[in-house]
Image (cartoon, rainbow, N blue to C red):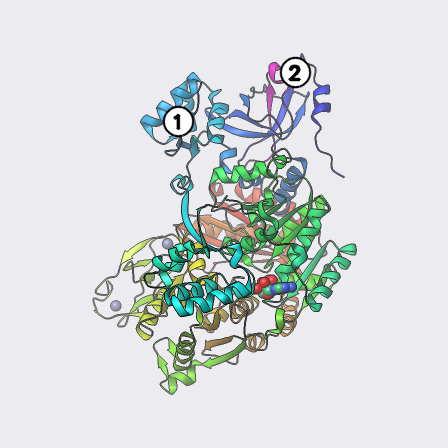
Amino acid sequence: MLFLPKKKTAVALKNTRETLFVNVLLPLPVAGFFTYRVPLELNDSICVGQRVVVQFGKKKIYTALVRAVTQKPPETEPKYILSILDAKPIVNEWQFRFWEWMASYYCCTVGEVMNAALPAALKLASESKIQLNPYADLSAETFSEKQIILIQTLQNQGKITLGEAVRAVEQLKIIPLIQTLIEKGIVTTEEEIEERYRPKIETFVCLSDEYRDEEKLQKLYSELERKALKQLEVLIEYIHLSQWLSEDLRDVSLPALSKRIKSASVPIRALEKKGVFILEERQVSRLTQRQSSSLIEDIRFSEIQQNAFDSIRNQFLEKNVVLLHGVTGSGKTELFIRLIQETLDAGKQVLYLLPEIALTTQIITRLQKYFGSRIGIYHSRYDENERVEIWKNVLPEGSKSNPYQVVLGARSALFLPFENLGLVIVDEEHDSSYKQYDPAPRYNARDSAIYLASLHKAKVLLGSATPSVETYYNAVEDKFGLVSLNERYGGIRLPEINLVDLRQETKRKQMKSIFSQQLLDHIGRSLDAREQVILFQNRRGFSLHIACTNCDWIPQCVHCDVSLVYHKKANHLRCHYCGFTLYVPEKCPDCGYAGIQMHGFGTEKIEEELSIFFPSAQVQRMDLDSTRSKYALQKIISDFEEQKIDILVGTQMVTKGLDFDNVSLVGILNADSLLSYPDFRSYERSFQLMSQVAGRSGRKNKQGNVLIQAYNIHHPVLSCVVNHDYQAMYQTQILERQKFSYPPFHRIVRLTLKHQDADLVNHAAADLAQLLRKSFGKRVLGPEYPLVSRIRNLYLKNILLKFEKGISLPKAKGEMQQCIQALLAPPTYKQVRIVIDVDAM
Ligand code: ADP
Ligand code: ZN
Ligand code: ZN
């Protein structure tokens, strides 16, 4: 049982004359706490979980977090804390426990976890850059003298660091003032302010209540048919876009409607006059809250869903974690909605994790229908002020005015100050983007969610159509509960999947560049039927690389050990690891031959070729390159929903959980490239990717089609995909994992050594492996070069440790860290960086 620090008792402890000290956490990769002295006048205000400003080192100031208030003086004379930033704690005891667990499990410092957990605006330090918000209304506020000096400095100098601000005002105590200015939105941290304060207004077309009636609408139809065909056309298009037939009215924006019909504005206005349409100006913003419009009671489960739902509840009586294994479109989300409602009814909070923000747009609309303004969204594309707003709204104090009882977010949402968590949903639990690669903490959000939930005595529901082998194993072993949904909702059949043999097609001269004739025919048929198509290719860019046909020269990145990828639109070669670019040489720089050829292909090439084969189709690419700006992704998704796009070409992004109604065909252009990736998870991943992207096809009305192009159509994973046979994939994989000592039977810890000097890395890695072997013997593998052995001018070498399940992990990690310390002790190796990745993926 955990107790929150009670402010009363803490105060009672304190005698105003007493000398108090605080142990604080700094957002830095240094281990342990730092002790500062509390000025007497702050004795009454100081408490655990508050932020304080401290000086660290000679000149730097940091925001630190109070972890403990004590009377015990440290050994060396402590500095005073400079100020207190919060009236009340902003971090609670559960969070501290969670951070401490994470640091110990993933072998990093609590400071590093704190750094990941707190939004930047809550952890200002000397280096933090601040600037005036150009959209702020300065005349509406009154400022102190110091604040005025600061504002003037910002007006003159633009962006300055906090350290510079302190010097400008000649006073350290300015920091709480800056904090106040940030909270008021007058000063911002260095984030994308432009997009934040430009509220976007858009006009929406709504059907008036009067005409939401089937009969009235019919009458209107026949009336318009006789007198106003143009209006009828508009109305029909509106009905189509708003998905009237599915009884699930979507918002239709005026531009969206106008785009579909030539000179639509007159008939739209006419329908408005008649009282059929209501035109509404709305601010489209991320924090705009919607009112809930549907009732949970209106969800009618199918019998299978009801059984699954009952089973989940029953299993929660005994198990803390339940896996919901349901095929794509089986109605998992509807089950989640009902469970969320029950948790809220019990007065508890819900955390709904999604692997990618790409998915939030769609899920949020579905959830807001039921939970309205009780939902907060939290992810890294939000700017800092919004993040702080949500942070504060999850806090109990905030909850009176604006209760975020449900938080939907990507992995960082785990760090919010929950007080009373009842349920954590981890949707698409198999997704590898739940793992943070860099920087520390290198945590897996799914696994961390399970720990977080245990602190709160909350339940965890893992959802997936293609569970990870680890999770399914846990379910089979009865550690987790297991509930399966094997049918799509509404009796719709899973898509029909067919393989296209590229070897045959090439022999028979049936290939049109990268497309088989079969695939082109299918695309053509879908387009004719006004249905949409999704094409998946794992690589972005135009071609994978270019090479000289005479001497095989391939352009390489100068900073990394990879070949460059050709991007046609930008007309350059680019490194996907560091961003280095190079113009395409006309002649081979090695041999002078003017015959450079492209090999392989990426999304950009598919996009271009499609426009040749289907000149009238609207083609859109969805990959990292086309979605860099903040709203680009959201726009592509909504354009596709509104059928402004006919063919969507994308990388992994298109595979994930998106729910479109009108997609009848999914094409996978090159399955071989997925399957040949050298990693013990590559079969599992390929199965997941292909099944997931296949699942985008034919969701609402009818069975969809999937075509997979491959050179080796006899690959066993492909037959699992074609037959929708998760079990077969699992059975073969689990045997492999056992045979070769991989998870879930062994835990993997990967150590990566990095340095600019290749020889030094090699020697250090060899020495470290030797040290580790003394403790761990055969559990040590390597050192080995990773697939890409140099990134941004740092040479890399990996050592893999495999720990069997029975072994005490904390002890093993302790020994491992001792070996690392021993290695780094002599000055020769001091500069070698070692990254520890626990449960590396
Ligand atoms: P999943 O999350 O398993 O992919 P969804 O929850 O998205 O499946 O359900 C697929 C489709 O079926 C969605 O359009 C959803 O609205 C619909 N659906 C699922 N269950 C129900 C239900 N009980 N009543 C009405 N529609 C449902
Ligand atoms: Zn050459
Ligand atoms: Zn590079």
**Local crowd size for mark 1, using a 10 Å CA cut-off: few (<14), some (14–19), many (≥20):** few
Give residue 138's mark: 1
What x and y, as percent, mark residue 197? 41, 39
Confirm or reject: label 1 Cβ below 8 Å from ligand 3: no
What x and y, as percent, mark residue 460? 68, 53
**Disc 2 residue type (three-letter):** Thr
What x and y, as percent, mark residue 227? 39, 67
Find out whether residue 45 is within the magenta segment. Answer: yes
**Local crowd size for mark 2, using a 10 Å CA cut-off: few (<14), some (14–19), many (≥20):** some
- Residue extent of the magenta highlight: 30-46
Residue that badge 2 annotates: 19
Q: Looking at the image, which residue is at 26% across and 72% down?
A: 550
281 displayed left or right of 613? right
Q: Whereabouts is ligand 2, in terms of quadrant? A: bottom left
Secondary element at image label 2: loop
User: How far apart are labels 1 and 2 at the CA level?
Assistant: 41 Å
Residue 469 visible in the current orientation? no
Q: Looking at the image, which residue is at 34% across and 73% down?
A: 614
Foreground: 201 or 659?
A: 201
**Disc 1 residue type (three-letter):** Leu
Mark found first going from the N terminus, 1 or 2: 2
